[in-house]
Image: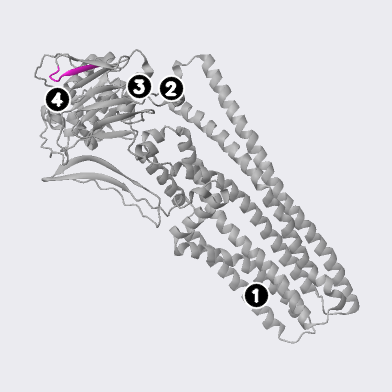
Amino acid sequence: MLSKEPKASLSKPQAWAGIILHTPKQTEGYSLTLARVYIFNDYAFPCNVPKEKRESKFWITWYYLQERRLSRGLRWWKTLAGLLYQPIHSVCVMALVQKEALDRVSDPDAPGDKLLELTILGVVSFLSLALLRWGDKVATENRGRTGGTRMVHRRQLFAKLLMLDAEELSKVDGHWWFYVGVNNTDVMAKDAYYQGFVVLQSGFGLLLSVAMICYAQLSKLAEEDVGDELVNLIMPTVALVATMFLCAFAVLRLPRLGKLLVQRMQGEAAWVDTLSWLCHAGASMRSLATRTHSKLDLRFTAESRFFQTFHIKARDWSNDTIWFTKWITHLIRVLILILGTAALLKSRRTGSDVFQSGDFVFQLKVFASCGKYLEKVISSLIKMFSASVGLQQFATLVNLPEKSAVKSSDSHIVHAHGSNEIRFVKDDAAGMDLKRNKSRMLKRSFSIPLGGAVRVSSTKERELVNFFSQVGELTMVPFGRLYRPEGIRVGYVPAVALRTPHTKVAEEIEDGCPVNLADGESERLVQLLEITPTKRMQDLRPGEAQLVAILLAVFRDPDVLVLNRPCALLTDSQHRKVWTILDLWQMGGAAKVLGSLGFVADLPSRSGVPRRKRTVITSQQDMALDPYSSCPVYDLDLDTGKGVFVPRSPTRTSF
């Protein structure tokens, strides 16, 4: 029976990728393979950013906004249309209504029905307000800036984490994934996506303000002989142009702000790393000495101080930039007020109609709107620039290659046809480059025969750990090659088993079992392991978690199973269970294990290459194998690169 998952609504295009395969299950005579599919789109952010432009904060933000526009489709345009009416209402409608009320309706000498004109102005103002409310409602319903945008980016990070090769995953500290997933995605939604609308709205209002002033002045120049009042009429336009040129200085301050924001992000990420470790340490904290607690406190305080230092600098730099714009716009507004008052006084003394109260109020109203929108543009640009720092870090993580260049070129692993062994071949021509990867370099060549059990020993812990990660194909051999038979599948169980959160043991066993278990069978299977079925995975003791991890690895039925210190944390009873499970698996795979446990398991054979004898690779120090195991045992010494077969007495193994 296939498990049903809630469908996720995919807006086009999305940047989810990858395919995660689960073990085949048999359902009503059919062999089915469960899969979780991530749809990958090269035109989605950040894959749509050309490599030569990924270091530019401007282009990172540009391509991000383009991707959001395409993904939202018609809703993006509805949002923009709803937001753009706000400048029209403020700059055009209300300014013209006030001008007409002062110049025409309140003038007793002007012809017309005053009551009718006043009613029309009130109705126009009310209808414009109603249209403004409708535009705000349309923008709110279609902009999608709340949880949806954040979760889209968080699912991108989740998919990338599951697809990354272990070699590439190890290059990024884990706290960066946590920090970017929690902080940067939130900043991307608020200060990149939504502020893009604010910049367009404010820029439109700014241009509309300039256009309204220019229109009013040109209409005056065309209709009347202005004479000496020409300077008073064109002064607002000159002031607007000068203001925009002076405020361009604010944009030149952004590069310095970018450096401060990067340092602030690094400090906050380090703070989050320490906080996350402290929150998840649990009982392990009790083993630390008082002096260690004090050092942790000092480190936490130092990281907080580092973050605060650059946060204050970035905050002050941003505020100074915004206030520079406010000072300039306010000073020029005062200049317009002084010159306009003088022009209005002169016009009233001479009885001229060229410059009236309505013209003066109109200029003040429109220029105030111009200054307001200019400040909003600068403020939004600063927020978007701050968000571009988070966008760059997000793009860096999502654009990581799923496989390293060496693995992708097939120069690391060579598929040897017809071979029945795994060979590590040292590269003698590596030269001085060995020093760069001295901790992981291959010291000598050796072979591992397949079809039995291999126990590995070394006097150096580092070489033993490197060997397990390399034979498990988690990391590469820096200077050398790994020859292996074509088509084999390798499984790996770490020394400390990973315990998944939020699931119970019975649920984990049921999901990992290659056959569908009836009601209650998964609980019975867990009870055979002497574990409480309703126990959560994260609450398991280390030995119990290791036993469950080995059983799940056996259920996947790989050709080679690599066990890194599998019995270091097991009790004697759990030791015997591990020996039995591994022996049964080598004799007949997962079907043999399930059959011995009393479950009917008629698993289909794997298509493709012929099935090889199953191989267990483990450490000799743990004595993880039953001394009476039925399979041949090969002891390999990494210090010399030599191995020898150990004779064993076959016996029948039962659980």
Which is more N-terminal, label 3 or label 4?
3
Q: CA distance from mark 3 to mark 1?
A: 81 Å
Percent from the top left, x then y, of residue 218?
Answer: 74, 76
Marks 4 and 2: CB-CB under 8 Å?
Answer: no
Nearer the camera: disc 1 or disc 4: 4
Q: Quadrant of residue 298?
A: top right
Cβ atoms under marks 2 and 3 closer than 8 Å: no
To which residue does mark 1 refer? 122
Tag of residue 584: 4
Instruction: Decide which of 528, 473 is in the foreground and name it.
Output: 473
Q: Residue at x 51, y 50 (%)?
A: 189
Q: Is residue 232 left or right of residue 455?
A: right
Q: Which mark is residue 316?
A: none
Magenta residue check for 71: no
Measuring from the top left, give residue 365's x and y in whole percent: 73, 66
Magenta residues span 629-635
Q: Secondary structure at mark 3?
A: helix
Residue 539: image location, x then y, percent: 33, 26
Sort mark 3 into few (<14), some (14-19) or many (20+) by Cα contacts within 10 Å.
Answer: some
Q: Which mark is residue 465?
A: 3
Classed neighbour count for the residue bearing mark 2: other residues with Cα under 10 Å, few (<14), some (14–19), many (≥20): few
Q: Amino acid at mark 2?
A: Lys
Specify the amino acid type for callout 3. Val
Give the Cα distance between marks 2 and 1: 82 Å
Q: Residue at x 60, y 34 (%)?
A: 307
Q: Nearer the viewer, mark 4 or mark 2?
A: 2
